[in-house]
Amino acid sequence: MIAPAHALTLLASKLEPGERVLYAARPDIRVTLRNKLVLWWIGVPWCIAIFGLYFAGRASLAIAIPFAMVGLVLVLAPILLAIDTQYTLYAITDRRALIVHEWFRPETVSCPFDRMDETPELLTAGGKGGHLYFASGMPTRMRDVPPARWPMRTAVAALAMPGMLWCSATQ
C-alpha cells in the first residue's frame, strides 16, 4: 500500500476536484517476473543456440540476426514489463477505481462505483497476490481487460469473464 499523501501527489492530475484517495497500491514486480519467466526459459536457450550456430559457421549473418533479435526480445520482454509494472498505480477513491499507467503507454482507466459489478471476483495467485475482477462489459482491447482467450494460468477465469476490468496487486 502507498501512503495516502504520496498517492495524492502521484494522482493529483488524475483526480477530480474534492476527490479523496482511500487506497493506493502498485502491482508486485515479482509476480510480473514470475508470470513471464517462461519467456526467459525460451529466450536464453534460443539466443545460445543462434549465437552458437553463427560462431560455429553454420548460420550466415543474414539468418542469425533476425533469429537473434527474436531471442533478445524474449529475454528483454519480462524486464520491460517489470519496469512498466513499476510505473502502474491502482487507486480507489471515494468516487471510483483508477488504474494509472505512466511509462511505456501512458493511460488512465477510470471506473465509477455505479459501473462496477455487485460482487467482485478475486482470484488468488498464491501468497499475498491475486487478480481482482470488478467491472464487466469493458472493451477487450483495453490494456487492463483480459481477452476472451487468455493463455495464462487464469485461462478458465478469463474465459468465464471476458471484458472484465481487473487489477493485479499484493496486499
Image (cartoon, rainbow, N blue to C red):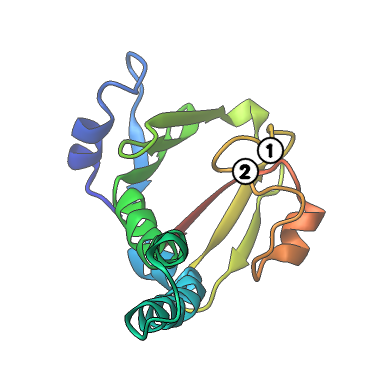
Report which residue position mark 1 lands on: 140
Q: Quadrant of residue 79?
A: bottom left
Q: Residue at left 33%, top 17%? A: 18
- Residue under label 2, please give it: 145
Q: Amino acid at mark 1?
A: Thr
Residue 1 visible somewhere in the drawing:
yes
User: Where's residue 77, x and y in %?
Assistant: 40, 59
Name the spot of residue 166 as percent of width and height, x first.
58, 47
Residue found at x 69% / y 32% = 139
CB contact under 8 Å: marks 2 and 1 = yes
Q: Is residue 113 left or right of residue 66?
A: right
For residue 71, the mark is: none
Task: Please determine whether, in this image, residue 138 is positioned above or below residue 121.
Answer: above
Which of the two labelled residues, at mark 2 and mark 1, occupies the earlier sequence position?
1
Work out which quarter of the rendered image holds the N terminus and state it.
Answer: bottom left
Residue 149 in the image: above or below residue 151 = above
Where residue 27 sits: x, y (%)?
A: 38, 56
Q: Residue at x 56, y 59 (%)?
A: 131
Q: Residue furthest top?
A: 17
